[in-house]
Image (spheres, rainbow, N blue to C red):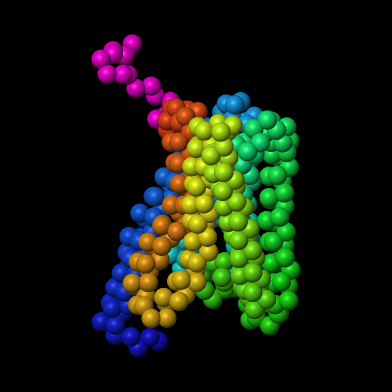
Amino acid sequence: MSNATPSQTNITVGLQYRGLLEMVLSSAPITVACCVFLFINGIMLFTLRSKSVFRETSRYILLYNLLFADTVQMALSQLLYLLSACRIWLTYPVCGVLAMLADLTNEVSPLTLVVMSLERYVAVCYPLRHATIITIRNTGVAIVVVWAFSSLNVLIRVLLLLDFPFEELESLQMKDFCSDIAMFLGPMSDHYNKAFTCFLFVLAGVTVTCSYIGVMIAARSASSDKASAHKARNTLLLHLVQLGLSLSSTVHDPLLIAMSKFLDRVVLLRIQSVLYVCIILLPRCLSALIYGIRDQTIRPILMYHLCCRLKLPRLGSHPT
């Protein structure tokens, strides 16, 4: 028989309602923003498959692969965010599958940026050989290599998890919300993840930077196409920014863990929401917006689909 007084029961119920209201108020705007971002990315993906010029051009195929990985990553991140906001604890196997899929798509993005940078480098520095080097077949092979390399990293992480003594656990039910860091069950997993992350972004950063320098040198050459070199230089600079945004997402969880040691829970939740939108969600949508607005071939088709295929009448004209 419970010894709780009516006043204590009312306080408990009030705290529960307050927590529920806080969860709804914090997660609802973020979920709406994520749905908008997913809609934009989905329209962009549909646009890149709607015309043969996009399906038969290497740089558009690579852009589709980048957007696909970012969209899947965004959807998985939002799912994990809602699970943590609703305080739903998963089992280790289910959390492991979601975390590994998130890692897979998160690593595909910087590797695809590397391939896209090399494609722009070849287009500017070796224009006469571009058509023979950057073919549809070679682009498909590069995409397969990117996904295979990312899958190999996920496989290694799974093998490292096998050393953890799961039989010693009382239950496979997790005692905390699911995240990437929650699946670092041993020191080897943590060390390997840090080493691979450093290797990946150093490789990507050096490749994109060298491609940018090569294009800059070619832009000063009298024999190069100045306009093409200028556009390629801006594109590679954009790739560097995207790479930096991808790198910033890797510090999201460690930053929250560090702040949780000296911040109040309510303040931490608010900071977590801001960081989640700025570091996780927004960079995944920037690619679609930037490429859709910059590219003169994509822009009219993208706007046509975003406006639900409505053609707005020009000023001074009368709709028929």
Q: For residue 89: magenta?
A: no
Instruction: Please give the name of the residue rendered at 39% of the width and 50% of the height, measured from the top-left corner.
Output: 33
Quarter of the figure with residue 294 = top left
Q: For residue 310: magenta?
A: yes
Instruction: Please give the name of the residue rendered at 44% of the width and 41% of the height, measured from the top-left corner.
Output: 289
Q: Could you tell me which quadrant the C terminus lies in? A: top left
Residue nearer the viewer, 123 or 294? 123
Residue nearer the viewer, 43 or 228? 228
Instruction: Please give the name of the residue rendered at 29% of the width and 82% of the height, measured from the top-left corner.
Output: 8
Q: Where does residue 247 sit, x and y in percent of width and height?
A: 52, 60
Instruction: Please give the name of the residue rendered at 56% of the width and 48% of the height, measured from the top-left corner.
Output: 213
Q: Magenta span covers which residues?
A: 307-320
Residue extending farthest to the bottom is 3
Quarter of the figure with residue 143 = top right
Q: Is residue 253 left or right of residue 154?
A: left
Quarter of the figure with residue 201 = bottom right
Q: Is residue 173 left or right of residue 74?
A: right
Q: Where does residue 188 sit, x and y in percent of width and height?
A: 67, 76
Q: Could you tell me which quadrant the N terminus lies in? A: bottom left
Residue extending farthest to the front is 222
Specify whether residue 276 is in view. Answer: yes
- 314 up-or-down from 206: above or below: above
Residue extending farthest to the top is 320
Residue nearer the viewer, 222 or 219? 222
Most prominent secondary structure in the magenta stretch?
loop
Q: Where does residue 281 sit, x and y in percent of width and height?
A: 45, 54
Specify whether residue 44 is in view. Answer: no
